[in-house]
Image (cartoon, rainbow, N blue to C red):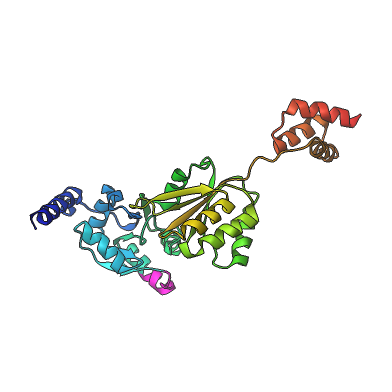
């Protein structure tokens, strides 16, 4: 019993250190997009707590989820529901409150608002009404997964939740075949094997990282080709928890001599030798000087 009491006192002391003095804080009217933890409560920023404490109310997807978060940090705020079921009328009422001078916080159940959640339309309406909108950044599952994957991060695209049906899923993935960037997607554990099979069908042997339970106790990264990952989970069993798929970019295309000659001949139909060589160099990444010499040969 004494250990339990000691732990509770320590927890309360930590809350006091984190909790801002709301009596001395004030917020300008506007909409504040506040990031919340995706698993580890320690990822809640001091600025986010400051903003929550000073806001007039908090707009959230689920009052039970956000209520637990506020309770953990000792905050007591008015909670109003704003989620996928909120209609135009509900948004109009919120925008009016903002225009009338309220400072409202928008949170999602976890992570950054507007990343695969219903905040987009509200932000658009608020901006159109001339309301101040600002972001209080923080935990973000797709970016954390990109870091943990070890796959190229110089260019990346977030493609949201993958569709649940094979046909729709493959159709979406095919739109990204030629995009030279790493792809990030949300997926559920029960659909993981089917999603990996479709990634194999569309992208072939590109490397994929299955990143799950980010910031939580059982955080895990498993990386390999789709075929290797399917075999892994067939042996180990389906994983649990929330998953981000990180799909590596397409490999560099290898151009044969015949490919290069064909590109040069086509370019020479409309361009001079120098410009044709420059155009094909941009397409292939090959040295412009070599392509110029080859173009001269092709021209005879």
Q: Is residue 144 above or below residue 127?
A: above
Residue at image point 22% right, 58% down: 72
Say whether residue 48 is visible: yes
Q: Is residue 253 left or right of residue 273?
A: left
Q: Which of 270/71 is in front?
A: 71
Give x and y (percent) for residue 272: 83, 33
Majority secondary structure of the magenta segment?
helix
Can see residue 185? Answer: no
Along the line of sight, which residue is nearer the eye, 50 or 2?
2
In the image, taking residue 223 as reference, residue 35 lies left or right, namely left
| Picture layout, residue 87 above or below residue 197 | below
Which contiguous range is marked in magenta?
Answer: 84-93
**Residue 87 among those drawn in magenta:** yes
* Closer to us: 19 or 110: 110
Which quadrant does the N terminus fall into?
A: bottom left
Screen quadrant of the C terminus: top right
- Residue at the outermost right position: 300
Residue 59 picture location, percent across and down: 33, 64
Q: Which corner quadrant of the image does residue 296 belong to? A: top right
Q: Residue 280 versus residue 286: which sits nearer the camera? A: 286
Residue 108 lies in the magenta-colored region = no
Image position, residue 294 (x, y; %): 82, 29
Residue at x 53% of width, y 40% of height:
154
- Vertically, is 252 above or below 210? above
Quarter of the image holding residue 196? bottom right
Residue at the farthest front position: 235
* Residue at horizontal 45 percent and vertical 48 percent from the top: 221
Number of labels in the image equals 0
Outermost residue toward the left in this view: 2
Image quadrant assignment for residue 299? top right
Q: Residue at x 63, y 62 (%)?
A: 171
Name the side, left or right, on which 34 lies relative to 161: left
């Amino acid at each position: 019993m004494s250990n339990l009491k000691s732990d509770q006192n320590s927890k309360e002391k930590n809350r006091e250190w984190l909790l801002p003095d709301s009596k001395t804080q004030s917020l300008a009217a506007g909409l504040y997009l506040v990031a919340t933890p995706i698993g580890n409560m320690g990822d809640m920023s001091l600025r986010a707590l400051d903003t929550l404490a000073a806001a007039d109310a908090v707009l959230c997807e689920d009052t039970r989820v956000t209520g637990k978060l506020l309770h953990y940090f000792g905050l007591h705020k008015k909670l109003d529901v704003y989620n996928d079921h909120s209609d135009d009328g509900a948004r109009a009422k919120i925008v009016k409150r903002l225009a009338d001078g309220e400072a409202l916080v928008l949170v999602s159940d976890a992570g950054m608002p507007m990343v695969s959640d219903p905040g987009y339309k509200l932000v658009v309406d608020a901006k159109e009404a001339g309301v101040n909108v600002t972001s209080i950044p923080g935990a973000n599952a797709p970016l954390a997964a990109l870091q943990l994957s070890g796959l190229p991060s110089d260019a990346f695209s977030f493609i949201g939740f993958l569709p649940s049906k094979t046909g729709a899923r493959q159709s979406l993935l095919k739109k990204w075949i030629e995009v030279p960037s790493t792809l990030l997607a949300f997926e559920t554990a029960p659909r993981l094997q089917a999603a990996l099979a479709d990634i194999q069908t569309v992208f072939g042997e590109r490397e994929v990282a299955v990143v799950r339970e980010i910031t939580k106790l059982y955080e895990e990264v498993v990386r390999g080709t789709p075929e290797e990952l399917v075999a892994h989970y067939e042996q180990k069993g389906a994983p649990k928890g929330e998953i981000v798929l990180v799909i590596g970019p397409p490999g560099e295309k290898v151009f044969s001599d015949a490919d290069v000659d064909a590109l040069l001949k086509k370019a020479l139909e409309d361009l001079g030798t120098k410009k044709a060589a420059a155009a094909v160099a941009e397409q292939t990444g090959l040295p412009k000087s070599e392509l110029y010499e080859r173009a001269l040969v092709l021209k005879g």
